[in-house]
Structures are given as C-alpha cells and as structure tokens.
Amino acid sequence: MNVTPSSQAHPRIRTFQGRRNRMTPTQQQGLEQFGHHLLPMQPGHLEQVQVFGRQAPLVLEIGCGMGDSTVTQAELAPDIDVLAVDVHTPALGSLLRKQDRRGVSNLRAMEADAVSVIETMIAPAALHGVRIYFPDPWPKPRHRKRRLVQLPFVRLLLPRLAPGGFIHCATDDLGYGQQMLQVFDEEAGLVNAFDGFAPRPADRPVTKYERRAERHGRSVVDIYVTRRLDL
C-alpha cells in the first residue's frame, strides 16, 4: 500500500474543540502531584523499554477523557502497555490521580495532539491496537471535515499498526459511526470481522458519558477492525 507522506496525509484541520481548562480541586491536585509523570512531545520514536521498563504490546488511546475506562482497561490487562493522549488538561489531572490511587503501572499519558504523536513518536508496526472512544462528532454538516476518523488519518495510522493490530472505536453519534464503517471499508489494509457494527466488547467499561448518552436516547455503537496479516 502506498502511504502519502504525513504532511499531506492529514492536513492540519483541528479535530477537537478547545475547552476552558477549569479544574476541580482534585484535578488540580492530580496535576500538582503527578504531572511530572506526563510524557513530553519529543522528536524520535517512543522508546518503550525506557518509558515502561519493558517491551510489551502497546495500545494507543486517543482522547482518554477523565480516565475512567482508560485506567480500568489498563488495570484489567497488566500485560498490555497503554499510551493515553488527550488535549484537555483537567481530564489528565483526573486520569493521573486515578492511576496513582489504583496503583496502575502500565499506563502513561501525554498532553498533546494525537496526530502529532502518531506522526512523530510512533514507529512502524509499533502498535498492538488503537482505541478511539467517543471522539468529537462535529455534528453540523459544515464541520464534519474536522472529524478525526477519515481516510487520510486512517492511512497515517495503518503503517503504525502491527499486522493483526486493531482499531476500536465507540461513538454515540450514529451518523459518525456509519462514516467510520465506510472509511474503514475503503481502506483495503483493514478487515472488519463483523457485518457492520461490532458487538459491545465486554472489556470496554461503561462510562458516565455513555450512561448519559443512553439516558438521552442516543445508542452507542462499536466499530472494531484489524490490520490485515499479509501486509
């Protein structure tokens, strides 16, 4: 598969909304006590042994929110290393505090644009998987070009996946979910083992955000695809 150079593969369209960084006292405490654990953006590929102290399957989580599902999934799969990337400072304060309280050692976080992290720090075939839970749906038609899961982004991400590596998305916006299915179907290097949306995986925790969406009558859908083994 021909991969467009990264500078052209994902034009610099902002895929997330800026939010005021109002922090609760506990979020502030999390940053003050554990902010030194945040990984910096740096040139060159991530040195996993240096960062995690071992070589293990690596999962990239894009948009970790308040860290509820991120910390839980890392805790339940100690044989997997998780790199969580988000641009929302208060959310990272929450994640760091929960990680410390529960003693989760296989999770690292970054305050950064995930596209820049993928372009700069993720080596070819380095990822066991990618999780993208509830990305900004940009529901207005004129804003949909800002959605993260589009074909140029997928083609930027694909070579960083190991053969057999997965992309798991979840959204409460049915239109975005259908777009994700279409995008993944257009990339020949990916395989969807399901006829459309995937069954809800047991290892994806139910978050407060998901419960709120369901209370408001919005169904949550999962999409799970893998990189072809013969690439």
Image (cartoon, rainbow, N blue to C red):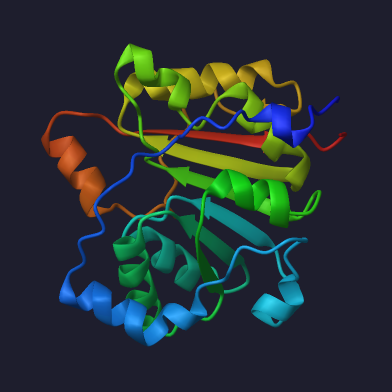
Rendered view: 213 above or below 182: below
Where residue 96 appears, as percent x and y from the top left, is 39, 75
Position of the C terminus, as image quadrant, is top right
Q: Decide if residue 130 is in sight here.
A: yes
Q: Is residue 77 left or right of residue 216?
A: right
Q: Is residue 23 left or right of residue 185?
A: left
Q: Is residue 19 left or right of residue 108?
A: left
Position of the N terminus, as image quadrant, is top right
Where residue 218 appears, as percent x and y from the top left, is 21, 29
Where residue 188 appears, as percent x and y from the top left, is 75, 21
Q: Decide if residue 129 is in sight here.
A: no
Instruction: Name the foreground residue: 111 vs 100.
Output: 111
Rendered view: 205 above or below 37: above
* Residue at image point 50% right, 57% down: 85
* Residue at image point 53% right, 81% down: 105
* Residue at image point 37% right, 59% down: 69
* Residue at image point 57% right, 32% down: 12
Where residue 119 appears, as percent x and y from the top left, is 70, 46
Instruction: Name the foreground residue: 160 vs 75.
Output: 160
Rendered view: 112 above or below 72: above
Q: Is residue 15 left or right of residue 158?
A: left
